[in-house]
């Protein structure tokens, strides 16, 4: 299947790798089909690209590559709706924002993208507990003495 992407132009994707987000994503409820694209020569970032709308794409990370202490519990209702019965099925990503000054890069640790790797069903889960932020900084500013 050929799709138009935001960052890579036209691309051939395997339609068996399309992830279904039954509820869409917050603010993008009408888009529910996405694919994860590996960034060339970069094993730390991924692109969540809408199959339906080329301009809808999000840069993502696997959180433990950058935030090794990241810890949360996926609510039972979300696990059930995604059909997750084993931790081996779970893929976790976080959407990132990379401004011109990369030192101000942030990750949305409050709302991880949770995907069932077997049935390719996903959703953005909004965590109710934890000290995570929607714009959690990658880099902390150093105190000036």
Image (cartoon, rainbow, N blue to C red):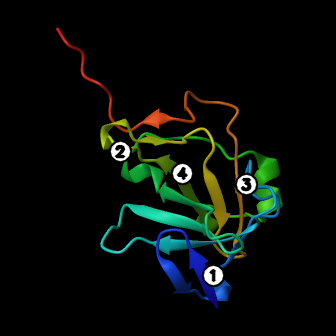
Residue 28 falls in image quadrant: bottom right
Residue tagged 2: 100
**In front: 71, or 44?**
44
**In front: 77, or 25?**
25
Residue tagged 4: 95
Residue 86 falls in image quadrant: bottom right
For label 2, the SS is: loop
Relative placement, left or right, of 24 versus 99 is right
- Along the polypeptide, which appears first: circle 2 or circle 4? 4
For label 3, the SS is: loop
User: At x 53% / y 83%, what residue is drawn?
Assistant: 10
What is the x, y in percent for residue 37? Answer: 50, 73
Residue tagged 3: 25
- Along the polypeptide, which appears first: circle 4 or circle 1? 1
- Along the polypeptide, which appears first: circle 3 or circle 1? 1
- Along the polypeptide, which appears first: circle 2 or circle 1? 1
| Quarter of the image that includes the N terminus | bottom right
Relative placement, left or right, of 100 versus 75 is left
What is the x, y in percent for residue 87? Answer: 62, 61
Counting other residues with Cα less than 10 Å from the Cα at mark 3, is it few (<14), some (14-19), or many (20 or more)? some
* Image height of 132 relative to 31, above or below: above
User: At x 46% / y 56%, what residue is drawn?
Assistant: 61
Q: Are marks 3 and 4 in contact (CB under 8 Å)?
A: no
- Which callout, 2 or 4, points to the residue nearer the camera? 2
Q: Rounded to the nearest whole Å, what is the CA distance between mark 3 and mark 1? A: 18 Å
Residue tagged 1: 17
Q: Rounded to the nearest whole Å, what is the CA distance between mark 3 and mark 4? A: 11 Å
């Amino acid at each position: 299947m050929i799709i138009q992407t935001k960052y890579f132009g036209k691309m051939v994707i395997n339609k068996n790798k399309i992830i279904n987000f039954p509820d869409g994503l917050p603010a993008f409820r009408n888009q529910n089909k996405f694919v994860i694209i590996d960034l060339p020569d970069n094993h730390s970032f991924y692109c969540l690209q809408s199959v339906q709308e080329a301009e809808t794409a999000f840069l993502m990370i696997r959180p433990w590559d950058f935030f090794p202490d990241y810890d949360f519990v996926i609510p039972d209702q979300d696990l059930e709706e995604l059909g997750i019965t084993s931790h081996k099925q779970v893929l976790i990503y976080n959407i990132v924002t990379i401004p011109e000054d990369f030192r101000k890069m942030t990750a949305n640790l409050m709302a991880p993208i949770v995907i069932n790797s077997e049935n390719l069903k996903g959703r953005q889960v909004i965590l109710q507990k934890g000290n995570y932020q929607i714009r959690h900084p990658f880099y902390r500013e150093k105190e000036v003495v």
